[in-house]
Amino acid sequence: MLPTKGTATPSGARGRVASEATAARARPAPTAPHPSVGTNPRRIAIIGGGPGGLYTAALLKRLTPDREVTVWERNPPDETFGFGVVLSDETLGGIEHADPDVYAALQRDFTRWDDIGIVHRGTRHTSRGHGFAALERHRLLEILHARCRFLGVDLRFRTEAPDPARLAETYDLVVAADGVHSATREAFAHVFRPHITEHRCRYIWLAADFPFDAFRFEIAETEYGVMQLHGYPFSADASTVIVEMREEVWRAAGFDEPDDTAGTDSVERCAKIFADALGGRPLRSNNSAWTTFRTVVNERWSHHNVVLLGDAAHTAHFSIGSGTKLAVEDALALAACLDEQPSLEHALAAYEAERKPVVASTQRAARASLEWFENLPLYLAQPPRQFAFNLLTRSRRVTHDNLRLRDARFTGSVEREFGCPPGTPPMFTPFRMRGLTLRNRVVVSPMDMYSAVDGVPGDFHLVHLGARALGGAGLVMTEMVCVGPEGRITPGCAGLYTGRQAEAWRRITDFAHAQAPGTAIGVQLGHSGRKGSTKLMWEGMDEPLDDGNWPLVAASPLPYKPGSQVPRELSRAQLTDMREQFTAAAVRAARAGFDLLELHCAHGYLLSGFLSPLTNHRTDAYGGSPEKRLRFPLEVFDAVRAVWPGDRPMTVRISATDWAEGGVTAEDAVAVARAFAAHGADAIDVSTGQVVADEKPEFGRSYQTPFADRVRHEAGVPVIAVGAISSWDDVNSLILAGRTDLCALARPHLYDPHWTLHAAAEQGYDGPGVAWPAPYLAGSRQPRTGRTDAPKPRLGFGS
């Protein structure tokens, strides 16, 4: 099931006006739990009569029929916003198991379809095999109303819920299903600690009185900017239509002007803009209004006997997940936990522990999808099929491999357009930079080993890098190799500031070139700056040495964290000396036989320290504006490029964000990448963070790849993507979608030095993009395992 759509506009049942939220903040919160907080709740109050609140009520009443369950809904039973609701097969399975009667009623009304249609610049591409099920939101509410009444739930329509603090005193359990503008969440904000982010697009929720034949994405390039339509059928004669565009496009098009009293101006204009998709038919509204999406995250979901559910607890952008879907899954989990746990306290803790990781994963995917549509203009020039593939895989939940399983014909056409030879996964296509052709798109990312002696790489480095060279990657990178003894991070860091070190590196490059022909080996040059003179990672990462410290230098005299050594600010004369250290190391690297050189301008090390306003407080020509902060890193790059052989490529690693307020942003990263590209960088290795100790990164699968994607398309330079890329399916997906040119993986290569060879074997690939060393050929197929299947019954006998 491809998770894509659902209702995002909060229903009147779940919304709360700002004045109510403000008033709720002033209300006193209960200072102690309700007396029954340690028991199975018998009296339950539910605030909000949307699908999440209603389904929770039905489940709790069905589990314990003598419970008293009351739902407060401020609107009439037939009033709601939005039109169609999409539920996944997984969610439906949970409903079927928990309440077969509700499942049967839903089944009778579902509209089902399999296709996704993407229309861009007059060309439609269709991907099949996805499997959707949707029904009218009004009908969903009717089914849940009927089920609640049958079970004996007290439904109170047109009735404001009492103050949540008072409910918490008089009921055993209060379920706040009161939507994205939850007054309950605001009343206990000091406990729930909500974080609400408004995004950059405006959208409006509409309907058309005909069924689309597929899930439809339509792109309109107007004189005001790019607009997009998301549409899907929800009944035999109607479809949901969402029109979305960036805020600045919305304003330029005049949609910010007030509509007439009937609210028809926006609706009619949207119908004209997307007349082709609609076949010239009109759109209709249901009290629809333009709005911006708000991502809601709460640090906690429960407070004593009050618990958040659905949009009150979390939201996920409509382009990937249904708010209704998540709310229904919350209800299923909450009911199960109340049934399974010995007390309310344990049940609410179990509910939060079960749902928060699932929701966090969904929100990460939704954020990726949301940002893809925010940045849609970046992708308009892509080849049509690649654009369609990029859209389908935008959230990183749909991948090359499962899309190939769903629709091999579509995926094959994308591969052919990309240039994949028959039977060749995208990751095994070649990539050329200057005189170097990489036979595949896999890079062994630089990883500090902290195992050198006096900066000299030894047997450990030979085995470590040699094993990864034998493992099939197109490019193997060294750890950060330091340009001077005071530029080391730790006493165990390798260097290229003596002839002895260069000879040791030559031993390693000779091995790689002789024993793994076709594998390139690159060196990453850097200087630790203010992050130097620290202990080995496993002895205390970023902790200063107990003794034997060496002096540190940096852009500004700022320690990395409290207790760290304070560096000296580099003078103009010292900047010249530092530049010469880099060029001398680059000359040694060329003589040592490295195929590629990467300049380390990331992670808070010396050159990165010049780029970030958080670490560069200089008032001379090397500090202040972004252009001045770039000056020294560019001087170093130019000096190194001048001595590095012209046919060998140079890349630059940058931190595309500092993950800290006031630091480098994605917009800054694009400007930095453009500058290095203009000076001759062949690719930008796009990492993030590690610049300041108080950073707040947003970790997750492939979490740094959107930064590489943006740099690639805005700066127009090849990129290397890094950051929790863990599977060959991820690599294929990112390459084929055009989000990166190369993928660098670190931890997977620590887990498996032959990761690339195994990726080829698992995909059944044995072409020129990878080569097994002759002594390893016998292992090029997965080892057989013992049979675990038993003989199946063939004959049946009657009694």
Image: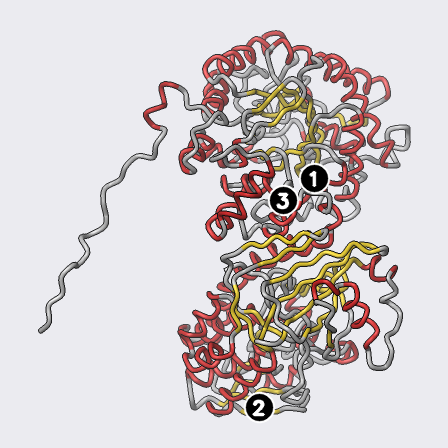
Label 1 Cα crowd, 10 Å radius (few <14 / some 14-19 / many 20+): some
At 68% from the left and 35% from the top, the residue drawn is 603
State the count of labels. 3
- SS assignment at label 1: loop
* Depth order, front residue of 491/698: 698
* 735 versus 503 height, above or below: below
Q: Give the percent coordinates (x, y) of residue 756.
A: 47, 31
At 75% from the left and 44% from the top, the residue drawn is 666
**Residue underneath mark 2:** 155
CA gap between label 3 and label 2 equals: 50 Å
**Residue underneath mark 1:** 561
- Residue 560 seen in the current view: yes
Q: Give the percent coordinates (x, y) of residue 617.
A: 84, 36
Seen in the image, is 401 located left or right of residue 177? Answer: left
* Tag 3–tag 2 contact (CB < 8 Å): no
* Tag 1–tag 2 contact (CB < 8 Å): no
Q: Give the percent coordinates (x, y) of residue 167.
A: 61, 85
In the displayed image of the protein, which residue is found farthest to the front? 279
* Depth order, front residue of 798/507: 798
CA gap between label 3 and label 1 equals: 45 Å
* Depth order, front residue of 426/127: 127
Label 3 Cα crowd, 10 Å radius (few <14 / some 14-19 / many 20+): many
Residue 242, quarter of the rendered image: bottom right
- SS assignment at label 3: helix
* 726 versus 568 height, above or below: below
Q: Which quadrant would the C terminus be assigned to in this image?
A: bottom left
**Kind of residue at badge 1:** Lys
Disc nearer the start of the sequence (3/2): 2
- Disc number lying in front (3 or 2): 3
**Residue underneath mark 3:** 386
At 68% from the left and 31% from the top, the residue drawn is 653
